[in-house]
Image (spheres, grey):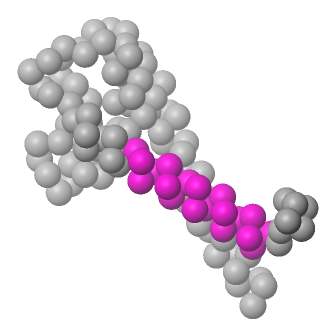
Amino acid sequence: MSEQELTPKAKALSNYIGMIVGLATVFVLAIIFDIDSSKEYGWFLGFFHGGWAPANWIMSWFNDSILVKAPIHTNAYNVFWWIGLVIGAWQWIKLLLATIGLIGICKKNK
């Protein structure tokens, strides 16, 4: 079946499932690569810590030991953390908009 033959509902649902899997992966990565408050982090991990900062922020509501940003870091970490945060937050916004769109498509096709 080609992509043109898929209904709008099927396209929206497949995109939605892909985003859910991606965000679940972010939660798993945030758990595996937790932020150690005694280590200094550089630019590379700053990008990743920023990317899963929304997930860390949500998990920090339930566990006080989870950090959103490393307390000891370089200036490059700070810059790349913000870049990662913008990208990670954009993914959450896309998921929210996709959820609203999928609900609208499902209601319209009833």
Residue extending furthest toward the right: 4
Residue at the image point whose x is 50% and y is 49% from the top:
22
Q: Which residues are magenta?
A: 8-26
Q: Is residue 62 visible to us here?
A: yes
Q: Residue at x 66, y 58 (%)?
A: 15
Position in image of residue 8 (x %, y %): 80, 69
Quarter of the picture containing the C terminus is bottom right
Q: Picture quarter containing residue 99?
A: bottom right
Q: Does the magenta segment cover residue 25?
A: yes
Q: Residue 9's quadrant in the figure?
A: bottom right
Q: How many marks?
A: 0
Residue 101 shows in this picture: no
Residue positioned most to the bottom = 110
Q: Main secondary structure of the magenta part?
A: helix
Task: Tell which of 71 and 17 is nearer to you.
Answer: 17
Q: Is residue 36 left or right of residue 50?
A: left
The location of residue 14, given as percent across then percent down, is: 66, 63
Question: Could you say where residue 56 lies in the image, as x and y percent from the top left?
Answer: 29, 44
Q: Is residue 97 magenta?
A: no
Horizontal side of 9 relative to 67 (left or right) equals right
Give percent across and percent down for residue 38: 9, 21
Q: Is residue 38 above or below residue 10?
A: above
In the image, residue 24 sits, relative to residue 84, either above or below, namely below
Residue at the image position 55 percent from the left and 42 percent from the top: 90
The N terminus: image quadrant: bottom right
Quadrant of the image occupied by residue 75:
top left
